[in-house]
Amino acid sequence: MEKAWWKESVVYQIYPRSFNDSNGDGIGDLNGITEKMDYLQELGIDVIWLSPVYESPNDDNGYDISNYKGIMKDFGTMEDYDRMLKSAHEHGIKIVMDLVVNHTSDEHPWFVESRKSVDNPYRDYYIWREGKEGKAPNNWGSCFSGPAWNYDEQTDMYYLHLFSPKQPDLNWDNPKVRREVFSMMDWWCQKGIDGFRMDVISMISKEPDLPDGTIKATGYGDFGPYVQNGPHVHEYLQEMNQKVLSRYDLLTVGECSGVTIEEAKKYASLDGKELNMVFQFEHMDLDGGETFKWNDRKIKLTELKQVLSKWQTELYGKAWNSLYWNNHDQPRMLSRLGDTKEYRETSAKMLATCLHMMQGTPYIYQGEELGMANAPFETLEDYRDIESINAYHELVESGQISHEDMMRYLQYKSRDNARTPVQWDDSENAGFTTGTPWIMVNPDYKQVNAKEQMSREDSVFHYYQKLIRLRKELEIIPYGAYQLLLPEDENLYVYTRSYKEEQLLVVCNFKKGGVSFAVPEEFRREGEMIIQNYPDRASEDLKKDEVALRPFETFVIRF
């Protein structure tokens, strides 16, 4: 398998609004990121993926961009950005920008022009349609509740927005749009950035006749089959690659909702024609249901193993995997699969081991390395996330879900769980800001914070540090083949990795109780333990026929 720096890297996602506030206005900013470069260097990460910092009215926390070449005032200035980029590079850290080009803000100059008249030169930059019998052009619902069409009186037509009405979809079938986007990307590359994470990039090509979708529980049609992995998506990404990506040495990852293994092999093929890797959501959607993700169902371990193993084995040697448990759109995985009370650190380390020993490029989301968990939001007023607030109104007011149930579901699944400020120390507001934080700080910061974690050798922080170091030392971790053992076991996730003359055995107990496990003979005979989350677990213990695993225990044996 061909080697590349991005295959051996560990990426750290920063959600700037919640990372570190340098000026006391309650909002994280670019100078706040620069202040923490030493911390990130000590953790050992190679790349920062920066969630959007562009100019934006902030309807969807910066994913609605009004100027791709400007910085949102909340975050600072372009000078602050340049200083941060320079500091990152001086610390040996690369910067990957969030690229949001399925849609813009409705305050972007292109859209402001587009809505003026049907013959405006920018009209065709967006997807406009006439209504049908006094209603929207089709029955699609948006990702953020309500219809996916917005009526515009000015020209008596509707524009498409798969997300908020303030996020009109760009028309990628227009070559001028593609030229504008590629030119803007090139501008950032010339600034010296190191790659792009591409927001909902699998949705940029729509079926031209925009047919009605199957009606969902919300009463709206499902647009998925007509916009995910659409007719020209690979053609457009290959054009992007020729015009921009191939001219620089970049890390590129596409957020691809609705992606299948077969599609992923095209997006992230090792021939390098499109992207380096994709984010898939199959493992994240295992606890979904009729009302999208709004429930408190638990992920079944057997199903999780089946999904992750499929991606590990079927992409091997054909396309590259990205590995993640958390990001700005997901609740904290520690609250979904771990234990946030008695076994908080033990389960955080187990989840980290399970993911970081797999094949692909791992992504750490800010605070994950500290064992941060979901926040105890109590009222609807505590939430800031447009998706959560809209879903509450839609599902509770229509009588589909009771107020009590919905509040419980939001506590479990809201995106705001990932967006509470990073917990730096035990001072007021967790050391995130001297002002009033834009969103609640998780009150557990007195116990869970970076200062305390860094002071203690057996902390989650130091465990992540060791996992990152192992990935750099052992080629088998990024490049080895994966094989699942015990697929039907409901408590244990066990797999091997193989590369050249070397093997790893990864054992993870997902249960809050003890279970026994028989270590395969070759590992028992000649294996050495390279990492474990119970410090008293000795290599000698593994020589026995059966090993009694404790709650959330994990270890890795090298043979």
Image (cartoon, rainbow, N blue to C red):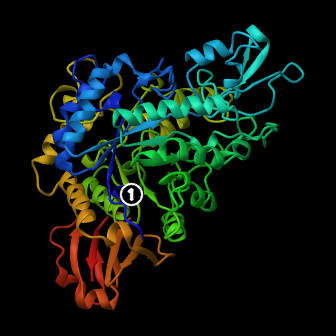
Pick the front one: 144 or 210: 210
Task: Report the amino acid beneath label 1.
Answer: Thr
Is 261 displayed left or right of 355 in the figure? right
The vertical placement of 305 against 70, above or below, is below
Residue that label 1 marks: 361
Q: Name the residue rendered at 27%, 56% in the picture.
A: 343
The vertical placement of 332 against 110, above or below, is below
Picture coordinates of residue 76, whole percent (x, y):
31, 19
Query: From where the camera sits, is residue 29 visible?
Result: no
Crowdedness near tag 1: few (<14), some (14–19) or many (≥20) residues, C-alpha within 10 Å: many
Q: Name the residue rendered at 47%, 70% in the picture.
A: 490
Rendering quarter of residue 504: bottom left
Rendering quarter of residue 267: bottom right
Is 212 displayed left or right of 554 in the figure? right
Question: Total number of numbered labels?
Answer: 1
| Quarter the C terminus occupies | bottom left
The vertical placement of 268 against 200, above or below, is below
